[in-house]
Image (cartoon, rainbow, N blue to C red):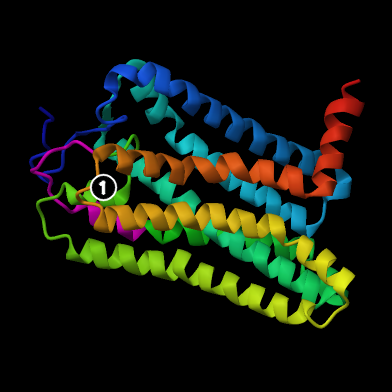
Amino acid sequence: MPSFNQSTAYPTVFFLTGIPGLEASHTWISIPFCCLYAIAICGNSMILFIIITESSLHEPMYYFLSMLSFTDLGLCLSTLGTMLGIFWFNVREISFDACIGQMFFIHGFTFMESSVLLVMAFDRFIAICNPLRYAMILTNPRIIAVGFAIIIRGTTILIPLLLLLKRLTFCRSHVLHHSYCFYPDVMKLSCSDTRINSAFGLALVISMAGLDSVLILLSYVLIIHSVLSIASKEWKKAFGTCVSHLSAVAIFYIPMISLSLVHRFGKHAPPFVHTLIANVYLLIPPVMNPIIYSVKTKQIRKAMVKVFFVKLS
């Protein structure tokens, strides 16, 4: 049984969950998960390396893409240790403070990715609707400032949320329903009044991901309004530059919405459904974003060929 800190009544450990009902097959289940982690880490590292080393990619659009790869890499690494610890060594225990730390990085990188996708939508809006002022608006100092603003926005707002969690008492089961620490999952184990936590968490999601998604939608409404006034061939070319970003937005927000719906309305769903959707929510964007941008962006493909074939030969 986990021990308690008498002064604050929070458990010293929680117990993470692998795939409920398939514990005997965790070693085999770990193989596809390892492949996904390897693809995500290698793919995003490759994107970062190419953008840093290739001077032809030192443009605002690719700087923002490097920010997306950085957040995907951070999101992936935030869960790698606990996920593989469960599947390979059946190490399910995680201390309360380590759980708080993991939540900080998971939710922080999630909010940062939402902010990056919003900035990328703004980048496409300026490039298509006001191309003559594009270079004047998105200067290097402004891009650096935007990068720092994204980090500050994604992390500082989490501090009061996690401090609110530390004031709760936990006298129920200490078994979490995911292979990593997820804020709503931890909060459900408390026997304290969690209305303040729930309200603040909901306000945080609405003000971050909710607001970002609305502004992204507004950006594309303005983009569509702009491109409809130009020639057919130019319309296709202009909107073609948005396909990769729209795909990234979809694979980020759809799993997030699905996980939120399952947590709120899926109380009677089989336990493995919660676990699978939670893993998809964190793994699919880091895995798919490098693939999408490598396939859909000609400049990235050419840079990859140049770096990994020409230079190595």
* Point 32% across, 46% down: residue: 182
Residue beneath disc 1? 185
In-front residue for pair 204/249: 249
Q: Is the C terminus in the top left, top right, bottom left or bottom right quadrant?
A: top right
Horizontally, residue 87 falls left or right of residue 212, namely left
Q: Position of residue 293 (x, y in %)?
A: 71, 47
50 is higher (above) or lower (below) than 111: above
166 part of magenta stretch: yes
Residue 289 position in % (x across, y down) = 63, 46
Up-down relation of residue 44 to residue 164 (above or below): above
Q: Residue at x 77, y 59 (%)?
A: 60
- Looking at this view, name the residue that lies furthest to the front: 232
Check disc 1 and give the amino acid type: Asp
Relative to 75, say whether 187 is above or below. Answer: below
Residue 84 position within the rendered picture, expressed as x and y whole percent measured from the top left: 41, 24
Q: Which residues are magenta?
A: 159-176
Q: Residue 34: percent from the left, percent from the top?
A: 50, 25
Q: Residues within 10 Å of mark 1 (few under 14, many from 20)?
A: some
Residue 151 showing in the rendered view: no
Q: Nearer the viewer, residue 8 or 24?
A: 24
Whether residue 36 appears in magenta in the rendering, the answer is no
Secondary structure type for disc 1: helix
Please tell me which residue is depicted at 10% across the width and 44% down the height of the picture. Answer: 7
Which quarter of the rendering shows the N terminus? top left
Rendered image quadrant of residue 69: top right
Counting labels gives: 1
Instruction: Kindly tell me whether residue 219 is visible in this rendering.
Output: yes
Q: Quadrant of residue 136?
A: bottom right
